[in-house]
Amino acid sequence: MTHNTESYTGTSSRVPGRLPDEWLNRSVPDTTGLHLLYARDLQISAVDLLVFVHIPKCAGSQFMAAAMVRYRKDPVIRWFPPGTKQYPSYKASGCHPQSTMHCSFSELHTCIQAGSRRTLMREGGRALYVAMMRDPVERTISEFFWGRKNWCPQLPSDSKEYPWPNELCRLANRARNLSKPKDNSFTNQDILDWLESPFNLGHNRQTKHVAAGALAPAMVGGGQCVNMHYTRYHRLWEQRYINDRDFSETRSFAGDQGSSNIESLINEDHGLTDSAWQIMQQHFLFVGVQSDFYRSVRCLRRLLGISDHMWSFLFSSNKRPGADTHRSNAPRGRIPTHVRKSIAQYNKLDVSLYLKVTKKFNRECPF
């Protein structure tokens, strides 16, 4: 099922409602056959593992900070990635937390299932996945500003592998010659050129993060996740489309990085949305919504049996947690409607998945 994105420009609206009848007898499936009749019936035990799937630019760090309060040292609730003090014990599993930052669902799933079960998965335990999603238009805009500062080499001689290919960095920082840009130094054409680039892997990142499926290799023994390593990312998705009759190889204008029309094929592959939604239905305990950050935290913590007052002290600022609070907020607000509509068109898969997630979220977290 696809959704019309012609008029979609992003949304942060909340749909209030009374406690639905199905709340008391809802069924939430996962691969172990777990069924929840009510939040308190979850009965998380020390053999279970809550796994956070950190999608880039979705306020995941703030969400995890709020969700893990009190349970960082809890003998029953175990999170992966864990608190920093627990890293050494987890490193022995071959699935090091520092290597799994922003890893896709399948990379994490493979790591956990193939790692040392004594360290990660315990006998009779369940892997229960948690994630935070964000409005696709806002997330993509955030990646543009964040990526050109942090995902591009600051010096031409830098040979490190980055999440963005060189071509994309040149477009984002064209007028600055790869020097560190100021957030307020951009034009609408800068964003459009970046948006329309065939090298732009930032589109539909949320869907890809969940739906990569069996394509993603295990992150055993360190290394970088596919989302943080452009060459690995390209090779991974090439496997899906290499036999597609529309697949074609190209080169960047500088000739130093291989690419293809993979992104255009991905952006029209609506089967990825269906796959991502099915994976969420089967494996995910909870998916929050960044625009409803507080309610997302409350819903997850209630699910885990934590009272609301135990996290309310975390955020004393008037700024909404999860929002981008640095100086680039102002120029982002100047991005016109026609650019936002273009972003939505390029992110049709994410828009479709996000609408499904928010509908489920509003139904199951009505308070």
Image (cartoon, rainbow, N blue to C red):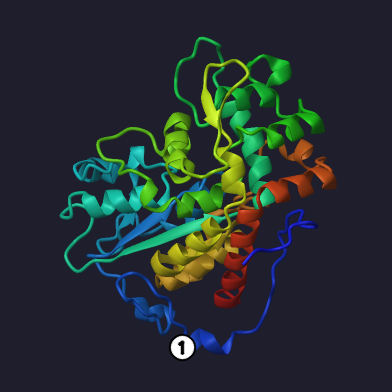
The residue lying toward the viewer, choosing from 82 and 249, is 249
What residue lies at 43% left-to-right and 83% top-to-bottom?
Answer: 38
Residue nearest the observer in this picture, 326 or 91: 91
Identify the image quadrant of the C terminus: bottom right
The N terminus - image quarter: bottom right
Please say if 149 is above or below 3: above
Give the quarter of the image for residue 354. Answer: bottom right
- x, y percent for residue 52: 41, 54
Considering only vertical position in the picture, is 285 above or below 7? below
Residue 261 visible from this viewpoint: yes
Q: Quadrant of residue 34 in the image?
A: bottom left
Q: Which residue is mark 1?
A: 25
In the image, farthest residue toward the top: 157
Is residue 324 something one can see in this rendering? no
Front position in the image: 77 or 93: 93
Q: Does 128 sit left or right of 184 as displayed?
A: left
Q: Position of residue 29 (x, y in %)?
A: 40, 75
The percent coordinates of residue 245 (x first, y second) are: 54, 43
In the rendered image, residue 322, in percent from the top left (x then y), is placed at 60, 50
Residue at coordinates 51% horizontally, 45% vertically from top-left?
Answer: 244
Label 1: which secondary element: helix
Amino acid carrying label 1: it is: Asn
Work out whether 156 lies above or below 244: above
Q: Mark 1: few, some, or many residues within 10 Å (few <14, many ≥20)?
A: few
Where on the picture, by quarter, is residue 5?
bottom right
Which residue is depicted at the point 54% across and 51% down? 206
Residue at the (29%, 72%) spot, across then down: 32
